[in-house]
Image (tube, helix red, strand yellow):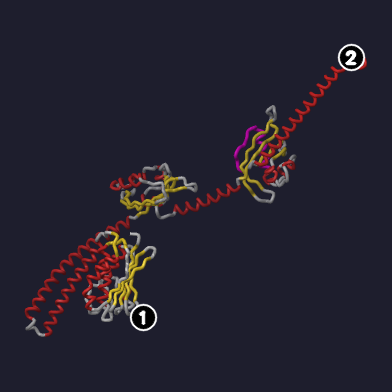
Amino acid sequence: MKQDSDKSREQLIGELNDLRGRISRLEKHEEEREGVEQALQESQQMLQSVLDTIPVRVFWKDLDCRYLGCNRPFALDAGLRSPEEIVGKNDFELGWAEQAEIYRADDRLVMDTGKPKIGYEEPQTTPDGGRIWLRTNKVPLRDARGRVKGVLGTYEDITESKRMEERLRSSETKYRIFADNTHDWEYWLSSEGRILYTSPSCLRITGYTSGELEADPTLMSRMVHPEDVARYQAHQAESKTTGASDELEFRIIHRDGGIRWIGHVCQAVFDAEDRFLGRRGSNRDITDRKRTEKALAESSEKLKFFAYSVAHDLKSPAIGIYGLARRLSKAYKSILDEKGRKYCDQILKASEHIAALVDKVNVYIATKEARLSMEPMSIGEVLRMLREEFAARLDIRCIEWLEPEMPVEIKADRLSMIRAFRNFVDNSLKYGGDRLSRICIGYQASDDFHIISFSDNGRGLEGKDSERIFKAFQREGTSSGIEGAGLGLTIVKEIAEQHGGRVWVERRGPEGEGTTFYLSISKNL
């Protein structure tokens, strides 16, 4: 090799440039290496950041079941300050030493077989001595040549989920006990029409067991009485998916061949997210009630027929007796002595009373049986009509009629209101006595009712009469010597109840002077 002094200037420049090139390549290689190292470091930091932030615990071990690493949540579960502290430790050295042998057995199984163990549940003791539940996954950890060199594991804390499951299980047990012991036959149909649940009471009501009904979804509809099938099917077809309940009464044929009446109520079922889950139904055996209703209806018809017969049979003789007594009094009054004339007058009054009683009985029956015609009506208009009707009697006795301006319109049966108001006015005139000088009508309203009152300043009621007078054929204690059938206020009570209200009476003064009758009428008719 030539000495540098022997080299030409051009050779020295060439070697210098070659050296510079080498240095440049070395510098570039160093930069690339540093870039790779930085990228690798950033990648490792990113991986660690991902591992530390995912809501799952991650760990990996070597073939001796010693920890090679973990993410931060796992380290904190182990009672460590950082993942680095776990390297080289085994399960016996951590807070869950109580379960260490179980964990290591799972590790060895995965490493020996090379097969993962996925999604199994196991307990874990926490550093503070508590107990939590885990859902664990373990897979074999392999090197570049595919050989098993350890185990990679993950788990999530499912303690709250387990507690919720336990609460749900306890709640389900409690409600199943409740449902299984209900007297009514309860069931739940899915949105597809499958029977999800039916209570054991179905056996008592139908003769079929829960298992039979759940195994055969058509059995429920097949036991419906042939005459009620069309109504039952229409009800099923109209089954709504709203929260409103639907009701139906129908007959079924019991397994023993007997006929039972069912009172059915069903309603849509929704979950917390308002998703339709099907329909819940409740069937009650109302056979005894239907028999009672039928017996009462038959009894009512017989009683009504009897009442009409009696009324008809009484009225004709009463009219005949009245006519004969009147003719006797007119033709032979001059030859009868005072006692005879008195007897004739008593016969006339008695026969008039019988005829009036028959009329009242007919009105009472008509009130109970007549179909109401609810319509808007003016209270003031009805009162003006009554004032004209009673005008002569009011004027003769100098009784003041006080009627406030009441532009009030209510919804009621007009004929019923006229009958009720007439009874109140007639009562005041009959039982008010000589002190009666004023009849006052009032009106007030509550949230649900119209309340009409009729007050007077007459003789008043005895305290014991306040409730008794609304019963059939019961009269006031102060009514001695006054004609009446004892049905007027009974009719008013019937009218009040037909209009969703009630009737009651109050004494106005401490000495019993004056009476106020109240009639309430529902605003929701």
The foreground one among 127 and 270 is 270
Residue at point 61%, 37% (across, down)? 118
The quarter of the rendered structure image containing the C terminus is bottom left
Is 323 rendered above or below residue 263?
below
Q: Is residue 177 magenta?
A: no
The foreground one among 130 and 156 is 156
Is 434 rendered above or below residue 203?
below
Instruction: Count all numbered tags in the image, as a single digit.
Output: 2
Is label 2 or label 1 in front? 2
User: Residue 446: percent from the left, percent from the top?
Assistant: 38, 65
User: For residue 329, which quarter of the picture?
Assistant: bottom left
Residue at point 48%, 52% (across, down)? 175
Indicate left or right for 343 with 493 as reference.
Answer: left
Main SS, magenta residues: helix
Q: SS class of the residue under badge 2?
A: loop
Q: Which amino acid type is shown beneath numbered disc 2?
A: Ser
Residue at point 62%, 37% (across, down)? 117
Is 430 rendered above or below residue 372?
below
Indicate left or right for 452 with 327 as reference.
Answer: right
Is residue 362 in view?
yes
* Range of residues picked out in magenta: 101-121
Is 16 rendered above or below residue 364?
above
Q: Which residue is mark 1?
A: 510
Cα distance, mark 2 to mark 1?
Answer: 148 Å
User: For residue 91, which quarter of the picture?
Assistant: top right
The tag on residue 42 is none
Q: SS class of the residue under badge 1?
A: loop
Q: Which residue is mark 2?
A: 8
Indicate left or right for 426 with 16 as reference.
Answer: left
